[in-house]
Amino acid sequence: MPLLLGAWGPRGAALAGRIAGEIKVGGSANPDMVPVMRERLLVGASRIGRDVAEIGVVLGAVTVVDTDGEAARARARTEVAMYLAVVAELDPTVALPDGLVAEVGRLVDAGRDEEAGTLIPDDVLDRFAFSGTPEQVARQAQSLIDAGVRRVEFGTPHGLTDDRGVELLGTEVLPLLSR
């Protein structure tokens, strides 16, 4: 049976390199993580003589797509604020502004998620979420495809409303992607 293993770290990725068909890096829209995961998978794959190219890398994150790109990005910032402290420390390719994670975490702990989200700069948001207009989201997803992912997973809430987000993903984002 095909196995998808979710992991960020070297040990989990090495295990996936031995036993999984795919590895999922959740909470990431960062194309720079693809070569990092390939290196980490290689550790386990080489132990059993497995070709690391057989193992699919899957990235997925919060997705908020809407024709109102600014509103979509604002919603995504609020969503990302709630998990930034967890995933930011797992991504060795991202340099965050000093104190950002602590301040975002403090505001989230105080129930001020939206305010916390306003602190997240565009470049950081783009590493941990798919957000904006359909064209913006398609560019982000295409950068992952170009980096070598097997699949991109668009996570909730999908849009300003779930139904509209799913509709835009299917009718406007996916047609813009190429393999």
Image: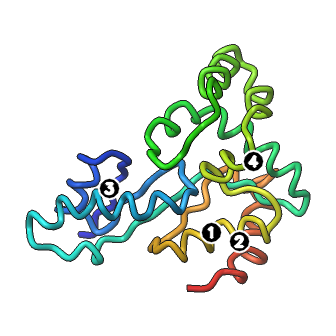
- Give the number of the mark in front: 4 or 1: 4
Q: Earlier in the sequence, mark 4 or mark 1?
A: 4
- Give the number of the mark in front: 4 or 3: 4
- Which residue carries the number 1 mark? 141
Residue depicted at 52% across the width and 38% down the height: 88
CA separation in Å, label 4 and label 2: 16 Å
- Which residue carries the number 4 mark? 122
Residues tagged 1 and 2 counted as in contact (Cβ below 8 A): yes
Position in image of residue 119 (x %, y %)? 76, 32
CA separation in Å, label 3 and label 2: 25 Å
Position in image of residue 10 (x %, y %)? 28, 48
- Give the number of the mark in front: 4 or 2: 4
- Which residue carries the number 2 mark? 138
Instruction: Give the quadrant of the N terminus.
Output: bottom left
Mark number displayed over residue 5: 3
Q: Residue furthest right?
A: 68
Residues tagged 4 and 2 counted as in contact (Cβ below 8 A): no
Helix, strand or loop status at disc 3: strand
Helix, strand or loop status at disc 4: helix
Q: Earlier in the sequence, mark 4 or mark 3?
A: 3
Position in image of residue 116 (x %, y %)? 74, 27
Q: Is residue 84 above or below residue 57?
A: above
Residue density around tag 4, few if under 14, some if 14–19, many if 20 or more, within 10 Å: few
The amino acid on which the numbered mark 2 sits, given as a three-letter code, is: Ala
- Give the number of the mark in front: 3 or 2: 2
Q: Is residue 99 above or below residue 71?
A: above
The amino acid on which the numbered mark 4 sits, given as a three-letter code, is: Asp
Which residue is more in the foreground, 137 or 96?
96
Instruction: Give the quadrant of the C terminus.
Output: bottom right
